[in-house]
Amino acid sequence: MTRFGMIRLTARTARTAVGPGVFLALLAVAAASLVVAAPGPVEGALTGALRYDLTSNAGAAERELRADGVGVPPVGPSTNPSASGLTPADDAVWGALEDQLGELHASMGPTLRASVAPAQFTTVTDAVAVSTLPGEPPAQVTELALGADPRFADRIRIDSGRLPEPVVAGGDVDVVLSTACAEAAEWHVGDRRSLTTPTGTRVVRLSGTFTPRDATDPFWTHTSSLVRPSVLAGVSGSIVVVQGYLAPVSWPEVSTVAAPVRSSIWFRIDPGVVTMATAGALVSEIRAFESQTHVLGPATESSRLEALRFSTRAPTFIDASVRRGAVSLQALAMLAAGPASALLAALVLAARLFARRLETASRVMSARGSGRLRLHAVTAASALAWLLPGAVGGVLAGRTLGGTTPTGGTVLVTVAITAIMPSLVAAGRWDGTGAGLLRARVMAEIGVLTVAAAAVLVLVRNGAASSSGTESLNPLLVAGPPVVALTGAIVALRVLPVALRGLAVLGRRRPGLTTFLGAARSSRTVSGGAAAMTALTLGLSIAVFSGSILSTLSTGIGTSSRLATGADLRVSASALSDDQLRTVAAVPGVRRIAAVSTDRGVDLSVGASHATISVLVVDTVALNAVQAGVPGGLAVPASLGHTDGGPVPVILSRRAADLVDGEPLSLAGHALTVAAVAPSVTSLSNSTTWLLVDAAVAPELLTGIPSPEVALVRLDGTARPDLVTQAVRRAVGTDPTVTTPAELTRARTASPALTGLWQAAVVASALSGICGAFAIVMTLVLGSGARSRLLAVLASLGATRRDERALTAWEIGPTTVAALVSGGAVGVLLARMIIPVMDLRPFTGLAGTATTVIDVPSTTAFAGAFCAVVLLVIALSIVALRATHGRRTRRPMAEG
Amino acid sequence: MTAPAVLNEPDILCTDLVRIYRSHGVEVQALQGLNLRVEPGELVAVVGSSGSGKSTLLTILSGIDRPTAGGARVAGHDLALMGPRERVGFQRRQVGFVWQQAARNLLPYLTAAENIAAVMAIARTAGPRARVRRTDEVIELLGVGDARDLRPVRMSGAQQQRVAIAVAIANAPRVLLADEPTGELDDAASSDVLAAMRTVNVESGVTTLIVTHDPSVSQHVRRTVQIRDGRTSTEVLRTMRVDDEGEEHHTAEEFAVIDRVGRLQLPDAYVTSLGLRDRVRLGLEPDQVTVRRDDRTHDGS
């Protein structure tokens, strides 16, 4: 025979419990793969949210790292002409600049360097007047700016004529204009005009007209009057300002005659490259790059571009998104507590089931002199033989599913939780004596209650740390919900036996057997269902809590959207013309509009000193009419429109009020009186330090009132907001931004961070439900031996199948019902306790804490779905177990 | 650890052994001062009806349970004072067990040979090669070569019990304890198993104690101890004599057991036959003690 030792004995022992072993292994696979895979999708969702925020919240220009300067950039050949990608002639002029822009790119930090596209630039002279040559018919008064770009030919498509020819010394200067500009300037291809500069006169010839190959290319946002002409109001009529392109090689000669020259250089940050993991490093490197002064090449008399300082608004958006990400991560961690606890409970129960299967073998080994330690070792090793491959398989599966490579530490922790812990649980089954178990239970309960009390106390007293702009988790918030839910389970486990004993007393008075016997048995075996109770309580409480977080977020976003819009509809632009305002007012469905002008940088006398402030000008009667009943409306006092010869009444923003600190105010020699103080952030202006005056008194205070930037619109009660919005958009054209609360809410809730939260809540609830149901089923299986013995006795006494089914239901019914009741109660408690201290501002955009909303439909939907999953899985499992049991009973010979 | 056995010490010695259980608040006296002495190499059957305390005796002798009072020594170990480590060593090397159910004797997922090797691996009594050798020895001794590579479920009842005996003696214990080893077997299989036990007893010299409710077992052993109400009541000694013509003559003599303080149990048949109850009259004769009915008691006065 082959040699037979402890290793083979252990291996053979492990193989005896194939059913529980396979179940254990599958649970280990599920748990390990979830632990390893989860960070991948979470990181993906957070990165997706970051990219979404960068793309949708920030304009293309705001994402650029840009520097503007006055002067001519360096001119000369590159050190490696063949690598520049330019023609030799163009390289001779632009190569040096390309080299230096490359060096600038190389000087960035590694994350920033990888996140930005190569530098782009524009170099343009100021516009100077061009006039028709003597003898030619007069044309539209035009000013021409000249620009050059070695790659301009790739960006445009010539509509008529041809590309400009290089300038021959002192000869005509060829330019191309966009077709729209040429038409506005009444300049035809081939026509020559005279360009007068401080340094002399040159003749300019229009060699061709073009349209951009890609009109949506953000490059064109850096050019003024290049694609479309600008029209200025002149003394004797309008002046058309256009910009034309020269042949790139002509730049050195032209730039000397048409001064001054302005240059812009920018690096476009690609949102598709930014990740949540590198966001912090990216922001740091951007800040470092912004803080430096960059000089392009050796400054000479002829090519002197001021020292450049780059800036961008990207960090603001990234920081905001990272804060949202931190909240998402916090919420995800809390959601994960549900399925994690349920999985752990299922693992513990499966380990006990496995140990139960080995009991006979263990008894034999014990009688043959196997010491307690060795029995532990054999049981643990047998369980490990199933669990370890499962855990390793789970790690590998999780790695594939999650698309991330876990660290060594993660793998170790995962294997420890999913393989070693259940093995120890299986082995430890032999340790407990009655008194010992009781002591351990009381100690564990005291421990959990203490931790829960401490967590609640700290959370209520200190609140959760406000979002810090990092992804770090608040451990108190992560641990709080499961610990509180565990407390709920503990209380339920203590209360349930008392209730069941009461039911047993009631049942004793009834004629049937099942109520008395079922309640009496359940009251004695409640502690056996502790794991199932814990899993279900945790699962349902997290499901209810998830529903509350999501409804609070939805409500908060809706509120902030209404506050941000400040009316039924909001139109904003850098300047809204009177025509546009009239057109908007005339749109069917619009009842009234209130236009708000903002005069920035106004000098306000504050006591003996001065402060710079923005002055908002609005017809306050119209504003009150538009904002009546709107959340966050300004509620302007009626006195604001009347001065009565005394001080002019104004409203101050909170920030402005803090700035002036009660000192007497005056503006343009007029004393002001503060009629009210309003929140700094309003829908009226993007300025936060402001004072508001009525349009009727504004002319006395300001030298000129700028064009309105914002128009707030009140719709007719019967009008459909979507149709009116479309009509307003058509009326005002593409430049102004038209927003409604509904659209803003839709845009905010479309963020992957929020949709990810929804998906996570659904997945967490479903997983918790499935694992909780498994825990119930395993409790049922663990009690099958005792139940079979009892049912055999009862059957011989005449009990019916119905009685048997009722007694089986009594085994799991009370635990399930109690767990669902305590889970629901704990869920509501968690929502009331934790959500107020969570900083949801990055999501909702509200200045204060979002009001906790336990939205009955969505919370019921979550809780209902959870219960449905639990009941379905229990029903399916019982059917499967019956089928298995049926097959077993038909076996001719029992094993062993 | 208990001191090594002194010379001429019996392998099993029970002195006034008492075991009282408390079950659901009710006190049960399973053993009420039992005395038993089994010498090294003896083969003894303890017979008793259900509830007589014989299984309790065996659980105490196997070190699984502890006596409430009295003394119990097996293979030189005082079972009342034995600690956990000593008990493990005791169970590994000093005693072997055979129980009624195969599930308690054999690991169902191992073959006969593997079961035998497993107990040696558990007890670490031999190296791998020695284990193989010893396995072959006990398989040959018990005559279960044909079941060597079978798992218990494939064996007959007699084979299962023979293999169980092989497993029990694999670590060469001083004492072999068997609890109803023939309880689930028919007569032929029972004889087969008891013959195997006798063979093992003779061949290896292991002290063997069989506990059973089956009185017919006494036909297979030299000494049978009857246990009743937690005490040893009678003993049957079988002797075999070969006469001058070479014929075997088997003689069975039944004795009552008297304890240290002179207590003995009268057989039920005697008590019933003479209508003995409450009080009896004792008489001391030069070579005997007589027990007579007390007529006054019998008359009801």
Image: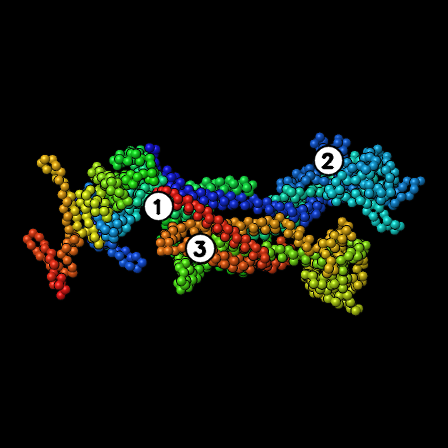
Query: Which residue is rendered at x = 39% and y = 44% of the image?
Result: A890
Residue B75: give x, y in percent of width and height: 22, 44
Q: Residue furthest left?
A: B286
Q: Secondary structure at mark 2?
A: helix
Give residue A359's position: percent from left, percent from top.
36, 46
Chain that bears disc 1: A
Q: Please check whether the numbered discs 1 and 3 fall on a single chain.
A: yes
- Residue A323 in the figure: left or right of residue A71: left
Give the mark nearer the N terminus: 3 vs 2.
2
**Nearest the eye: B275 or A771:** B275
User: On the image, numbered disc 1 is attached to which residue?
Assistant: A360
Residue at (54%, 45%) from the top-left corner? A38
User: Circle 3 is placed at which residue position?
Assistant: A809
The kind of residue tagged 1 is: Thr
Q: Nearer the viewer, residue A461 or A525?
A: A525
* Residue that protrudes farthest toward the right in the picture: A135
Q: Is residue B109 left or right of residue A672?
A: left
Q: Which residue is mark 2?
A: A96
**Residue A85 seen in the figure:** yes
Q: Nearer the viewer, mark 1 or mark 3?
A: 3
Task: Give me the chain letter of mark 3.
Answer: A
What is the secondary structure assignment of the residue under circle 3?
A: helix
Cα gap from disc 2 to disc 1, whole angstroms: 86 Å
The span from disc 1 to disc 3 (Cα, nearest Å) is 28 Å
Q: Which one is earlier in the sequence, the residue at label 2 or at label 1?
A: 2
- At 31% from the left and 43% from the top, the residue drawn is B102
The one of A275 and A844 positioned closer to us in this rendering: A844
Disc 3 residue crowd, few under 14, some 14–19, many 20+, Cα 10 Å: some
Q: Are marks 3 and 2 on the same chain?
A: yes
